[in-house]
Image (cartoon, grey):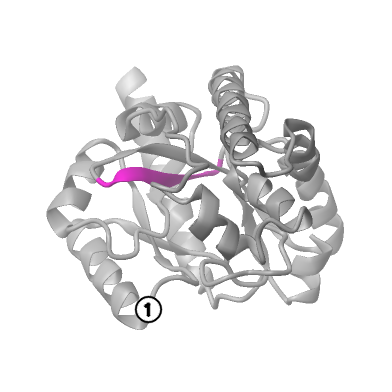
Amino acid sequence: MRRARAAGLAAIALTDHDTTDGVPEAEREGATLGVRVVSGCEFSVKAPWGELHLLGYFLPPGHPQLEEFLAGTRAARRRRAEQMVGRLQRLGVNIAIDDVVSAADGGALGRPHVARVLVERGASADINDAFVRYLGRGRPGYVEKPLPQLGQVAALVHGVGGIVAAAHLGEHGSEGQIRQFQEQGLDGLEVRHPSHSPATERRLARIAGQLGLVVTGGSDWHGDTELGDAHSPLGGQDIPGEWLEALERRRANLVAQTRHAES
């Protein structure tokens, strides 16, 4: 939050993978510093090309239904990390699961944490190299992730008063495919992202406009100093305040529709 304040941000969305644990502390600090925090989480769901990341916004930390789902997802992440470490050990790479847990520092375990340990051990030159050599799909340390359907996660998020947007689609997702996602509960598209070229941003913005989806954007900053081409520093993307206002309107409409249906 202090970094966000120093970067001149009025608001940030905290969307860690599979956890909302950092949100309450961020909200307290944000209130002190005058930076609004949008409570969120990043989920992984099935997609025709393998995996789609889904951003949930306006989530209530501590909600029993949400936390039960996230606890199960984090347990699956731990099992996957153990399998990746085992594969790397069989290749002769000096790595241990305890090192990966330490790298995660209490967060949900993922490939970036394995990558950090590979860099620390000198097995990879940097994070990108770790993915190219060991952890990318089809590489020797890669383990497939068990994934829920988009509709399942969208229903969960809508049920606790949030909305969902597809993260950093890049070249994935035709208009027809995104329309199918919308039918499963998708509310928006992350249009502005460090990995998106201007042409990709224009394409996704056009699709969002045609389908009536809200647009989002973000730095995808993971706290790393070595950012690669898929992340930028906190505040590294120019996101209009009007986009957040549109997200809030979409959420308000969904909440109103849910209450009307229940009554």
Among the 4 quarters of the image, the one containing residue 180: top left
Kind of element beneath mark 1: loop
Q: Amino acid at mark 1?
A: Ser
In the picture of the structure, the residue carrying the numbered disc 1 is 197
Magenta-colored stretch includes residue 53: yes
- Our reading of the magenta stretch's main secondary structure is strand
Residue 154 picture location, percent across and down: 38, 34
Residue in the image at 34% along x and 47% along y = 187
Q: Is residue 263 visible?
A: no
Q: Is residue 174 left or right of residue 223?
A: left
Q: Is residue 141 left or right of residue 175?
A: right
Above/below status of 199 relative to 101: below
- Closer to the camera in the image, 139 or 226: 139
Image quadrant where one finds the C terminus: top left
- Closer to the camera in the image, 246 or 236: 236
Q: Is residue 238 left or right of residue 25?
A: left
Residue 217 picture location, percent across and down: 48, 65
- Closer to the camera in the image, 70 or 1: 70
Boundaries of the magenta span: 49-58
Q: 10 Å neighbourhood of mark 1: few (<14), some, or many (≥20)?
A: few
Among the 4 quarters of the image, the one containing residue 65: top right
